[in-house]
Image: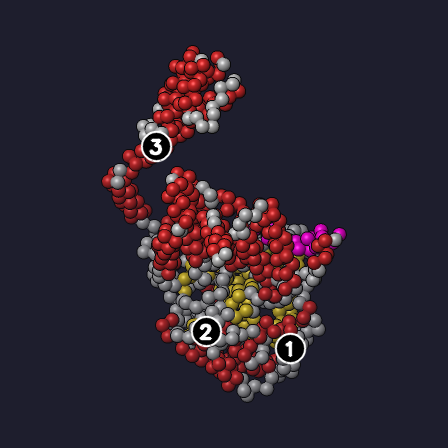
């Protein structure tokens, strides 16, 4: 009685274990794609990723249940997937509660409709999972799947700001294990006795295989990154053609020949891991013909992680409105009744680069779009987020060469701002007060000490802004060796004490939040410069001849990429601040009283940047020599290892094996022909015994049957190869007997 449960458990765990492992590895393989899609900005919502993860999990679990008909298993998986959608979407507040009884009534199809479009992602994941399980049963398919997937993720990793190498390593590991399982399945077909031993004692081979593959993948994944020793061919080709490299964000950066540790300045695509240094890149990005100087705002972020900035859940799920011609952009309803005064600023933007951006740039706050590429009829690629003040542009469409936008630029009345309410009310502002749980206490204490004498929120914000501008040094190459803290802001304020705009702006946003001021991080471009600015630089700046807020045509370069802060004041809305040392934020300030003297405002310039390093021409002769050496080495290895002979021998064996199978097929066809004509082979008879009996009855067929038997036994049991001539004689003899019966 005690052995029955043990036998049942052993059967449950080890029965058909290659298939179980195939299901598990296929699920892990597909999970890497899901992780990739979740990292893409704006591609998947958080609830979509959760649904896909749970779909993979429940499909894997149900595939492990033994002795279940495929139709029943598929039905259970389908029901579980629908249940996952209901539970996840309810928890995220996307749908109303759905009672179980409603799925057994006329509301079934209505319920399913409410689950769309999420339902298509879950069902698609389910179908793809089952397809992959079938696909990896054959070894060459595993190779195709692994190579294609790794290539796709590697290319996306190299040409974007997202980091996909952990997913690539996991795919390689899963692919290696799937190849081993495919080899075991082949062993099962060829040597049943050896397979039975493995099936009975799988641990004897599983442990060393798993240990070896896991160690290989782990070592490859944790190896330190090494910078390139020579310029890669793609970069060399782009440099030769005079095209600027656009990898300016996160890890996907252009590597400078002068200093391979630094990236080039430019508009960031990923801000989740701020820090490091950069080289100034003076490549023009756009020209802006504007009626008032401004910063050219792009995107905002509100979720501070301790390392950088990400979109919050509300920003990812926020409402995006289509932009229609002749219609203004709807304002943020949370700012209704704002007392903030504004002036109208019109900007015509002309792109001077082939680089694409996820947004259209403009002065804060955008009010309407008047044309795209000179046309005023079709704004389909545009989506407007009133909550973030962002004008998103579909990256599936060609980025416009020119566009015109109109903004309402805020007039800063400081006396009025000082009367703003102490803090906003409502849950919608809590995400702008969010701080990591592990934020060091000294950051909060510093903010409290700086603002302790300020009597109102506006003065508190100005105190933080002035403190950062006057107590920290601007540099594009901060000394990273000084930093020890895990928090980006803490590292800047107390250890490094130098940096560039990302350091200053993030520090101000975090410090403002720590004292109860809702803030968000903003990125875009600084104003740029006009032709007059360049002519008067060094002369007009000292004499007050440059109007810092003048209208004109401003050339904006990659070196003008910038970040700053917006702080919310109740009754007024979002107000921009500039904490970076050496920068002055253009503002429309309320006109002074006539008796007051108007003092010209001179913007301080950031530290002079080093001259850009000259472009390095690709050394085609050097590349040719390397390629020739590699080819010679491969040729020598091929000759030494007799690669050609091995390939020819393998092909010959495969061809011979195929010929043997064709001979056996011909013999089986002969047996079917004979059975239809009354010559039946008994179950206990071998083919030789059956032919001997038939030739006693019909001696006229003895010569042909002996020839067929000889070739059959040679193919079935012999070690010598079958030739094309053997196959042809067999087929001719079978056809001759068929015609004579």
| 92 drawn magenta | no
Q: Position of residue 239 (x, y in %)?
A: 39, 52
- Residue 653 numbered mark, or none: 3
Q: Which residue is mark 1?
A: 424
| 118 drawn magenta | yes
Residue at far bottom of view: 453
Q: Nearer the viewer, residue 515 or 212?
A: 212
Mark 1 Cα shell of 10 Å, populated few (<14), some (14-19), many (≥20): some
Mark 2 Cα shell of 10 Å, populated few (<14), some (14-19), many (≥20): some
Determine whether label 2 and label 3 are within 8 Å by CB: no
Tell me what residue is drawn at x 74 percent, y 53 percent: 105
Q: CA distance from mark 1 to mark 2?
A: 27 Å
Image vertical order of residue 521 relative to residue 669, above or below? below
Tell me what residue is drawn at x 47 percent, y 25 percent: 682
Mark before the other along the chain sequence, 2 or 3: 2
Tell me what residue is drawn at x 66 percent, y 67 percent: 332
Q: Quadrant of residue 547?
A: bottom right
Image vertical order of residue 441 relative to residue 45, above or below? below
Q: Which residue is mark 2?
A: 487
Mark 3 Cα shell of 10 Å, populated few (<14), some (14-19), many (≥20): few
């Amino acid at each position: 009685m005690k052995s029955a449960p043990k036998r049942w458990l052993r059967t449950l765990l080890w029965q058909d274990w290659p298939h179980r492992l195939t299901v598990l590895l296929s699920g892990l393989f597909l999970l890497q794609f899901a992780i990739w899609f979740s990292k893409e900005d704006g591609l998947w919502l958080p609830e979509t990723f959760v649904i896909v993860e749970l779909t993979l999990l429940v499909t894997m679990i149900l595939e492990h249940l033994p002795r279940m008909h495929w139709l029943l298993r598929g039905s259970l998986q389908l029901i579980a997937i629908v249940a996952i959608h209901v539970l996840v979407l309810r928890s995220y507040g996307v749908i109303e509660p759905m009672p179980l009884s409603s799925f057994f009534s006329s509301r079934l199809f209505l319920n399913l409709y409410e689950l769309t479009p999420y339902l298509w992602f879950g069902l698609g994941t389910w179908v793809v999972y089952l397809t992959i399980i079938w696909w990896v049963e054959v070894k060459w398919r595993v190779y195709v799947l692994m190579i294609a997937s790794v290539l796709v993720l590697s290319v996306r990793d190299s040409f974007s700001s997202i980091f996909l190498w952990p997913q690539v390593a996991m795919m390689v590991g899963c692919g290696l294990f799937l190849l081993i399982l495919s080899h075991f399945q082949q062993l099962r077909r060829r040597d049943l006795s050896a397979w039975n031993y493995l099936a009975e004692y799988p641990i004897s081979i599983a442990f060393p295989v798993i240990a070896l593959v896991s160690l290989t993948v782990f070592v490859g994944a944790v190896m330190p990154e090494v910078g390139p020793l020579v310029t890669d061919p793609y970069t060399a080709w782009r440099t030769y053609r005079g095209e600027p490299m656009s990898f300016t964000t996160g890890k996907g950066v252009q590597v400078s020949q002068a200093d391979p540790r630094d990236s080039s300045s430019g508009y960031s695509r990923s801000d989740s891991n701020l820090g490091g240094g950069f080289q100034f890149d003076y490549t023009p990005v756009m020209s802006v013909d504007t009626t008032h100087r401004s910063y050219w705002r792009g995107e905002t972020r509100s979720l501070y992680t301790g390392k950088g900035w990400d979109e919050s859940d509300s920003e990812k799920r926020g409402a995006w409105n289509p932009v229609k011609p002749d219609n203004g952009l709807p304002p943020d309803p949370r700012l209704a009744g704002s007392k903030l005064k504004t002036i109208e600023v019109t900007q015509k933007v002309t792109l001077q680069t082939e680089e694409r951006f996820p947004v259209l740039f403009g002065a804060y706050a955008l009010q309407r779009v008047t044309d795209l590429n000179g046309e005023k009829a079709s704004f389909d690629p545009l989506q407007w987020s009133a909550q973030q003040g962002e004008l998103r542009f579909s990256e599936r469409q060609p980025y416009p060469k020119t566009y015109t936008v109109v903004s309402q630029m805020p007039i800063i009345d400081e006396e009025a701002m000082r009367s703003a309410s102490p803090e906003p009310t409502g849950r919608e502002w809590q995400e702008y007060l969010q701080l990591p749980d592990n934020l060091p206490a000294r950051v909060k204490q510093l903010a409290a000490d700086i603002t302790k004498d300020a009597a109102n929120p506006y003065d508190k914000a100005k105190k933080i802004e002035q403190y950062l501008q006057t107590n920290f040094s601007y540099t594009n190459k901060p000394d990273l060796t000084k930093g020890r803290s895990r928090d980006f802001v803490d590292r800047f304020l107390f250890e490094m004490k130098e940096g560039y705009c990302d350091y200053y702006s993030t520090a101000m946003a975090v410090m403002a939040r720590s004292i109860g001021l809702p803030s968000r991080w903003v990125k875009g471009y600084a104003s740029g410069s006009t032709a007059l600015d360049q002519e008067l630089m060094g002369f007009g700046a000292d004499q007050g001849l440059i109007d810092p807020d003048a209208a004109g045509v401003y050339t904006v370069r990659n070196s003008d990429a910038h970040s700053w802060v917006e702080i919310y004041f109740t009754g007024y809305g979002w107000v921009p601040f500039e904490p970076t040392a050496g920068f002055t934020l253009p503002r429309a300030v309320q006109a002074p009283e006539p008796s007051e003297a108007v003092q010209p405002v001179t913007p301080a310039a950031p530290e002079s940047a080093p001259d850009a390093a000259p472009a390095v021409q690709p050394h085609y002769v050097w590349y040719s020599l390397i390629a020739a050496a590699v080819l010679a080495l491969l040729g020598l290895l091929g000759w030494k290892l007799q690669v050609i002979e091995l390939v020819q021998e393998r092909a010959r064996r495969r061809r011979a094996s195929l010929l043997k199978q064709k001979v056996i097929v011909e013999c089986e066809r002969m047996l079917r022909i004979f059975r239809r004509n009354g010559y039946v082979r008994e179950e206990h008879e071998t083919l030789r015994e059956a032919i001997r009996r038939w030739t006693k009855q019909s001696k006229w067929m003895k010569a042909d049957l002996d020839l067929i038997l000889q070739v059959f036994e040679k193919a079935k049991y012999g070690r010598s190869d079958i030739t094309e001539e053997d196959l042809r004689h067999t087929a001719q003899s079978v056809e001759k007997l068929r015609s004579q019966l």
